[in-house]
Image (tube, rainbow, N blue to C red):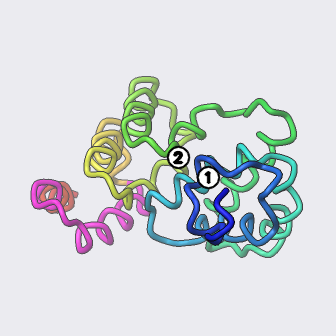
């Protein structure tokens, strides 16, 4: 690490775990609190998995303080803790749903769609806000394929998404889907 730079300016791929302190772990946890999904979200998710046991107390403290509104995020933090403690996730697809590589996220959504496993819906819905168009499109296709559009919470998420959608093709398709229900 270059001594003339702050740790926040360093390339996160090359920071040694021994140099990671509570301030950095808190910053990573705070990146997971944000409503908008971003590259920072995915990198923070993976970084916390890699940091491991050193992050446990901060993650547990955050879980204890979360309210019902953030239930999905709470489940993600529990997943991270479980992964750290057991080094083997109960639901390995969750790690791939929140992987930093958008291709892996999109492929995982397609895999879940093919398996028709509805237990992942609560983890997939937040990906409607993914920064990558292909991931958002994969989520929409899954929701259609698994006949989830009529579900009131899914419908509400789609309706909210339509006003924020930047891709005109996806926006048009969302409007079409919503008009049919």
Q: Which residue is farthest top?
A: 115
The residue pinned by badge 1 equals 45
- Residue 156, percent from left and from top: 37, 67
Circle 2 SS class: loop
Q: Which mark sits nearer the N-terminus, 1 or 2?
A: 1
- Residue 104, percent from left and from top: 43, 34
**Left or right of residue 178: residue 98:** right
* Residue in front for this viewpoint, 54 or 69: 54
Q: Quadrant of the N terminus?
A: bottom right
How far apart are labels 1 and 2 at the CA level?
7 Å
The residue pinned by badge 2 equals 98
Where are the magenta residues, as a range? 151-173
**Vertical placement of 37 versus 148: above or below?**
below
Circle 1 SS class: helix
**Vertical placement of 113 versus 58: above or below?**
above
* Residue in front for this viewpoint, 175 or 152: 175
- Residue 32, percent from left and from top: 60, 64
Number of on-image labels: 2
């Amino acid at each position: 690490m270059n001594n003339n730079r702050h740790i926040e300016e360093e390339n996160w791929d090359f920071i040694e775990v021994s140099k990671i302190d509570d301030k950095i772990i808190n910053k990573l946890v705070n990146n997971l609190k944000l409503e908008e999904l971003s590259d920072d979200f995915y990198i923070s998710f993976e970084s916390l998995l890699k940091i491991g046991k050193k992050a446990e107390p901060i993650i547990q403290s955050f879980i204890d303080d979360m309210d019902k509104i953030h239930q999905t995020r709470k489940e993600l933090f529990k997943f991270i803790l479980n992964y750290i403690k057991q080094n083997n996730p109960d639901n390995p697809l969750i790690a791939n749903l929140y992987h930093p590589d958008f291709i892996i996220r999109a492929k995982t959504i397609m895999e879940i769609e093919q398996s028709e496993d509805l237990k992942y819906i609560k983890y997939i819905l937040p990906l409607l806000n993914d920064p990558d168009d292909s991931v958002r499109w994969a989520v929409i296709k899954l929701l259609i394929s698994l006949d989830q559009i009529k579900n009131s919470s899914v419908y509400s998420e789609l309706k909210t998404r339509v006003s924020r959608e930047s891709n005109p093709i996806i926006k048009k398709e969302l409007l079409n889907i919503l008009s049919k229900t």
